[in-house]
Image (spheres, rainbow, N blue to C red):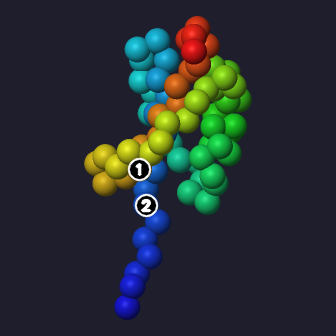
């Protein structure tokens, strides 16, 4: 019998060479909803991109990176 396990997620905010680890507010939410949730606390996320998830430390890590001040 197959057992389905939901993978733990981690969210990381990168801004000005600083890293902030953000907790997963609700595992049922899509990644964009998590970004919107945290944009109230971190306004820089209003103009952020989401990286493709990377599997590290037995969890999926998503990186939110500000696109303000970048060209191209």
The location of residue 9, given as percent across then percent down, is 46, 50
Q: Which circle marks residue 7 in the picture?
A: 2
- Numbered tag placed on residue 30 in the rendering: none
Q: Quadrant of residue 71?
A: top right
> In the image, is 32 to the left or to the right of 53?
right
Position of the C terminus by quadrant: top right
SS for dot 1: strand
- Farthest residue to the bottom: give it: 1
Outermost residue to the left? 57
Relative placement, left or right, of 37 versus 7 is: right
Q: Position of residue 61 (x, y in %)?
A: 42, 43
Residue beneath disc 1: 60
Seen from the viewer's position, the closer of residues 16 and 20 is 16
Which of the 4 quarters of the picture holds residue 33?
top right
Circle 2 — which element?
Answer: loop
Question: Which residue corresponds to the image point at 42% horizontal and 17% vertical from the top-left?
Answer: 18
Q: Position of residue 25 (x, y in %)?
A: 59, 48
Q: What is the spatial separation of the Cα atoms under label 1 and label 2, in whole angstroms?
A: 7 Å
Crowding around mark 2 (Cα neighbors within 10 Å: few <14, some 14 to 19, many 20+) is few
Give the side of residue 71 with respect to residue 3, left or right: right
Q: Name the residue nearer the viewer: 67 or 46.
A: 67
Q: Identify whether 30 is placed above or below 40.
A: below
Say whether residue 62 is visible.
Answer: yes
Assess whether mark 2 and mark 1 are in contact (beta carbons under 8 angstroms): yes
Q: Is residue 45 above or below residue 28?
A: above
- Which residue: 38% across, 45% down? 54
Farthest residue to the front: give it: 72
């Amino acid at each position: 019998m197959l057992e389905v396990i939901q993978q733990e997620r981690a969210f990381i905010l990168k801004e000005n060479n600083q890293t902030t680890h953000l907790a997963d507010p609700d595992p049922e939410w899509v990644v964009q909803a998590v970004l919107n949730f945290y944009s109230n606390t971190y306004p820089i996320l209003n103009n952020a991109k989401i990286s493709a998830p990377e599997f590290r430390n037995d969890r999926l890590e998503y990186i939110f990176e500000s696109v303000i001040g970048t060209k191209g």
